[in-house]
Image: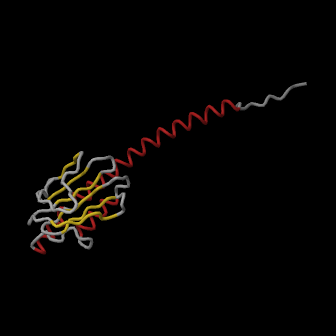
Amino acid sequence: MRRKVIAGFTLIELLVVIAILGTLASIVMSALNKAREKAADVAIKEQLSGMRSPAELFYTNTGSFDGLCGETTNVGMMFTHAVQLNTKSPATSACFPSNSMYRVYDATSGGIISQQKIPTPGKWAAFVTLQSGGYFCVDYDGTATTTATIPIPITTGTSTSNVHC
């Protein structure tokens, strides 16, 4: 009498394959997280860099940068969008219009943590915390730079005249 031979995998072989697939999946996921982080940083930089032209148009139309960072202006909306692109905390970001109130955001508190008046006519600047850490800053003279520390000093209760990246 002949025996039927049933070919198949043993339980151990299947578990080894599952373990290998799990390891590969974790490697791919960590690489994807880094890619997402970099993509968010690029989007933040692009958004802030794009604020320069609308800021100049704002100046052309109004004769000053006063109110530039207001929530209803194009620049203010672009800044708010850039802030929202960073989902990590703490994430401090600020927009400084000239002779007007500047807005400081903190993602951990969920919104504006400070508004102060700055006495610097004809100047503006904005910075946002990057997803990967550090800050990206743009200002009135075309500077666009990445720094490891907050590029413009923020002191609650006082004004700052150092509106430059």
Q: Position of residue 156 (x, y in %)?
A: 22, 60
The quadrant where residue 96 appears: bottom left
Residue, x 71% and y 30% (percent of image)? 10
Q: Position of residue 157 (x, y in %)?
A: 20, 63
Depth check: give the residue in front, 106 or 80.
106
Q: Quadrant where the N terminus lies?
A: top right
Depth check: give the residue in front, 25 or 154.
154
Q: Position of residue 115 (x, y in %)?
A: 23, 66
The quadrant where residue 160 appears: bottom left
Depth check: give the residue in front, 99 or 144.
99
User: Is 99 situated above or below 151?
Assistant: below
User: Is 84 situated above or below 131?
Assistant: below
| Residue reaching furthest to the right | 1
162 displayed left or right of 85: left
154 displayed left or right of 81: left
85 displayed left or right of 144: right
User: Is 154 situated above or below 5?
Assistant: below
Number of marks in picture? 0
Identify the colour scheme used.
secondary structure
Residue, x 26% and y 73% (percent of image)? 72
| Residue reaching furthest to the front | 157
Q: Position of residue 12 (x, y in %)?
A: 68, 30
The quadrant where residue 137 appears: bottom left
